[in-house]
Amino acid sequence: MIHFQIRHIPEVSSTNTVVLEEARQGAPEGLVITTDYQTAGRGKPGKDWWSPRGKNLLFSILLRPPLRLNQVPLMTQIACRAVAKTLKEKYGIDSEFKRPNDVMAGGQKLCGTLVEALSTPVVLEAVAAGIGLNVNAEASELIPSAVSMAMITGKVYPLKEILEYILEELSERIGEWYKTGTMR
């Protein structure tokens, strides 16, 4: 099990940028940076991630996994599947992992992930696992191919509660992966 330490910063360039900087300074595994707004959010290479201020769940987790460099991309699958399971079990929202780094609901993007590594050519030092989940945004605040939890259900959700549920699921999945080397 991973024990998380959550730190909220109202506005950052990117939660992954902050987590990677903290990793360089020796921060321990389990640091979680959340924000209301990113001025330079990133998605997969070459893509920006934009979200309206304070409406969606934007966070990154610092991990120091005992893994090989070539295993880092599997962290994306773990993160996406943890989000999809949380959405189904806690909120009744059907969604699925879509390669390479999205969670989709009804063919629309509900969540994106970005996993970045800090490493030397042979040693994995740290991983920043960033997650952007559209929670309370309205259609006019998202790109046309995106959807939010609120748009699906008509309800408004507490961001902190969703974060806690996702971190709980991630802790179980990552802990199991560290021990067994297998994903669920």
Image: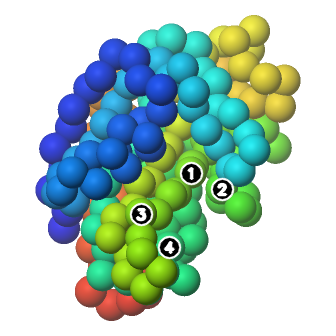
Res. 21 image quadrant: top left
Q: Amino acid at mark 2?
A: Asn
Identified by mark 4, the residue type is: Val
What residue did someone put label 1 on? 114
Residue type marked 1: Leu
Closer to the eye: label 2 or 1: 1
Q: Is residue 3 rendered to the left or right of residue 145?
A: left
Q: Secondary structure at mark 4?
A: loop
Between marks 1 and 4, how big is the CA–CA gap?
A: 11 Å
Disc 3 marks which residue? 118
Q: Residue at (49%, 43%) from the top-left corner?
A: 131
Report x, y in % for residue 180.
33, 90
Residue 48 position within the rendered picture, expressed as x and y whole percent measured from the top left: 69, 33
Reading the chain from its start, which is encountered first: label 3 or label 2? 2
User: Residue 1, how many percent across, how many down?
Assistant: 19, 67
Nearest to the eye among marks 3 and 2: give it.
3
Q: Residue at x 60, y 21 (%)?
A: 51
User: How packed is label 2: few (under 14 Cα within 10 Å), some, or many (20 or more)?
Assistant: many
Between marks 3 and 1 in the image, the one whose residue lies nearer the viewer = 3
Q: Nearer the viewer, mark 4 or mark 2?
A: 4
Q: Which residue is mark 2?
A: 101
Q: Earlier in the sequence, mark 3 or mark 4?
A: 4
Q: Give me the residue at 48% from left, 80% from top.
A: 121
Assess whether mark 1 and mark 2 are in contact (beta carbons under 8 angstroms). Answer: yes
Res. 72 mark: 4
**SS for dot 3:** strand
Specify few, some or many for label 1: CA neighbours under 10 Å numbering under 14, 14-19, or 20 or more: many
- Mark 3 vs mark 4, foreground winner is 3
